[in-house]
Amino acid sequence: MGVVNATPDSFSDGGRFPDPTHAVEAALRMIAEGAEIVDIGGESTRPGATEVDEPTEIARVVPVIAALRPRTRAAISVDTRKPGVARAALAAGADILNDVGAANADPAMWELLRDTGAGYVCMHMQGTPATMQAAPRYDDVVAEVDAFFAERLSALVAAGVQPEQVSLDPGIGFGKTPDQNIALLRGLGLFARHGRPLAIGVSRKGFLGKFTGGDTHERLPAALACALFAVRHAVRLVRTHDVLATVQALRMQSLLEGPTP
């Protein structure tokens, strides 16, 4: 899943795609590099980010999705917490809702999923982007995220959403300390018990710098190490800003671990 943020303030690529044309070209480049999904975002969810209003978010993502849809058969995801934005994005041609706010029960989002059959990435986050890194607290982060997945899957099915629509994302960096992120990565295998594909997003995140010392654009080797580890522990969807490097690393891992040529 390649990341295209049509925002002025995202932590890594904010402001890089100032109009829909730039964002569409970036998405097509990622698809050419091997992305099977492109994730279009119109609201930064970096730590400390403030929420944007729904019309602003729609104005950022819908023109990109509408222009991209006729030019690719790759899946298009919209990164949003808002049902209104999700509805507009699906109408423009998106296939998947990537919901960092899945911890907040919103019947409108679930009704939209039920009625459209769209894919859904259900992500765990403690707090909101504005508050999530203030003081994350868990007794056992792996057990609590696991319990969240169980509860959310049950609630989604009760709302009429099919399990096959749902992928699960533990939300690395979303309301977790660096050590808690490492614990979640080490505990990924547990989440496979829910029978749904696992998604992971570690690309360029701050916790990598805590352990390696690299700034935002010097964290690719650490992110690749996490992606390779995650795929060996049941993850099937890797969200990244660096598609080409990630695809090459994963293909080589698959070759090395597969049957002898």
Image (cartoon, rainbow, N blue to C red):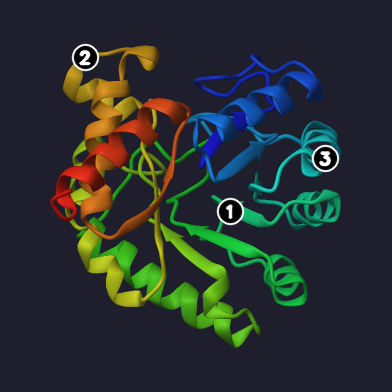
Residue at which label 1 appears? 99
Q: Nearer the viewer, residue 221 or 110?
A: 221
Question: Which of the two labelled residues, at mark 1 and mark 3, occupies the earlier sequence position?
Answer: 3
Residue 140 at what x, y percent from top left? 20, 60
- Label 3: state its secondary structure: helix
How crowded pointer 1 is (Cα within 10 Å; few <14, some 14-19, many 20+) is rated as many
The answer for how far apart the CA atoms under marks 3 and 2 are is 37 Å
Looking at the rendered structure, the kind of residue marked 2 is Gly
Check the image and report above or below for 106 versus 45.
Answer: below
In percent of width and height, residue 174 lies at 41, 43
Mark-to-mark CA distance, 1 and 2: 30 Å
Which of the numbered marks, if any, corresponds to residue 213? Answer: 2
Q: Is residue 125 above or below residue 65?
A: below
Instruction: Judge whether residue 129 can be spotted in this image.
Output: no
Residue at (16, 43) in percent of width and height: 256
Q: Secondary structure at mark 2?
A: loop
Q: Which residue is mark 3?
A: 62
The answer to whether 195 is drawn above or below residue 212 in the figure is below
Decide if residue 11 is on the left or right side of residue 253.
Answer: right
Mark 3 closeness class: few <14, some 14–19, many ≥20 residues within 10 Å: many
Residue farthest to the left, as pictured? 260
* Mark 3 or mark 2, earlier in chain: 3
At x 58%, y 53%, the residue is: 99
Q: Check the image and report above or below for 259 versus 60.
A: below
